[in-house]
Image (cartoon, grey):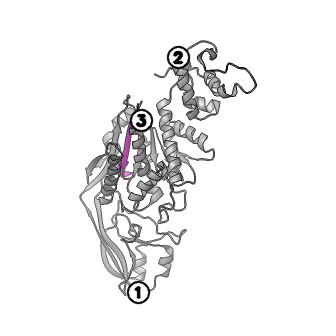
Amino acid sequence: MSIGSEIYSLADRIFPICRSITGKGVVETLDILNDWLKNNGCPEMNITNVPTGTPVFDWTVPKEWRITSAYIENEAGDHIIDFKNHPLHVLGYSAPVDEWVDLEELKKHIYVQDDMPDAIPYVTSYYKERYGFCMTKNMYDSLPEGKYHMFIDSELFEGNLIYADLVIPGRSEKEVFFSSYVCHPQMANNEASGPALLCELIKYVCGMKDRRYSYRFYLGPETIGSITYLSKNLSVMQKNIIAGFNLSCVGDDRAYSIVESRYADTYADRVLTNILEHRESDYKRYSFLKRGSDEREYCAPGVDLPVVTFCRSKFVEYPEYHTSKDDMSLVSPEGFEGAYEVMTECINLLENNGNFRMSVLCEPQLGKRGLYPDISKKGSYDAVQVLRDFIAYADGRNDLIGLSDIIGVPVSELIPVKDKLLENDLIRDVAE
């Protein structure tokens, strides 16, 4: 099975689960992911419970939500929509209700997606208690006059917010950070894709024979989860994280996207931008003004972590976003494989980067080291041109990203060149 198919399969397992910012859907999802990690020879993520009412910076951990069933019933006893058929039919975090109402009153509690009349929208009310339902605009417009039974069996109670994290140590305490979220019900690209890719990256990091850096992985509900996590780990994260990547909407195969940090000037910005520049010239670049996921928290003033968000099609920007159309047909093994390759290229860049300076004066004699052709003829120099260009700019001013930008070749092609020069004691890393 290909890497992309592995990720797709894992995303498919967690896709059907009804998740919210709290509740058993999050627990079930994290249990599946930890079971997958264990079966693939990786350490399980640590699970943390944070009680309702806990202050986290300017926020407070909310009540836990439990939902058992929900439907709208007509006078004939038919369920015109039912939670068991699709969790998006219920307003996220909906309070309970058990009332018969007329059509006019019913419509006050129904949400639709006007620009996509055959899709069920995803709507939530996390921090104000209300009840409600969602359906397609086509169904909404076709409802006949009559009496309707609104029924939601749910509960908001003193419980816990749950998140998971894992730190895999390397030679250095400095960390590379990966983050995604588990809080959306039955959406593929905007939910299941990020956690599935993150688990495959854990597997990749665990398989690295010699890790230069430590790696921190986090999964939790979007916004309130990352705020909670930061409130408990901010000092160590600020001290150690050198680059971070929030993973969102990484399963489709339409585009690659970066949502930059606040000033687009962090190490993570440079790393991901360089990889995408050489992989797909028409990738999408969004400023922090177009933020929308947990990069908001990681880059907030006073937090200021070097984090960017990586997407295929960016949240909000694709038509199926936050609707029932964001299903497993929207993502693909090929889309996942591309996202995985981008992230592992970022890891390899970080692991191999440095500011390299020549250790000999003037141009080195490459021939005696077997690094240069011993026959001079037209075309014989082409194979070593990248090597010669690397040497020409190895003056301690440029890391691999800078060299890649100057020479115009991907970092993946510079890494073996760097290794050859190190093996022959021709360069040294002045950043160490």
Q: Tell me which residue sits at (31%, 71%) in the image.
A: 69
Residue 228 appearing in the image: no
Per the image, the residue denoted by label 1 is 146
Residue wearing tag 3: 208
Q: Is residue 205 above or below residue 103?
A: above
What stretch of residues is rendered in magenta? 212-227
Three-letter amino acid code at the position of disc 1: Gly
Q: Quadrant of residue 9?
A: bottom left
Q: How many other residues sit within 10 Å of disc 1, few (<14), some (14-19) or many (≥20)?
A: few
User: Going from the N terminus, do you reach mark 1 or mark 3 first?
Assistant: 1
Q: CA–CA distance between discs 3 and 2?
A: 25 Å
Q: Secondary structure at mark 2?
A: loop
- Residue that sits furthest to the top in the current view: 361
Residue at position x 64%, y 33% from top? 408
Q: Residue furthest right?
A: 378
Three-letter code for the amino acid on which mark 3 is drawn: Met
Q: Which mark is residue 74?
A: none
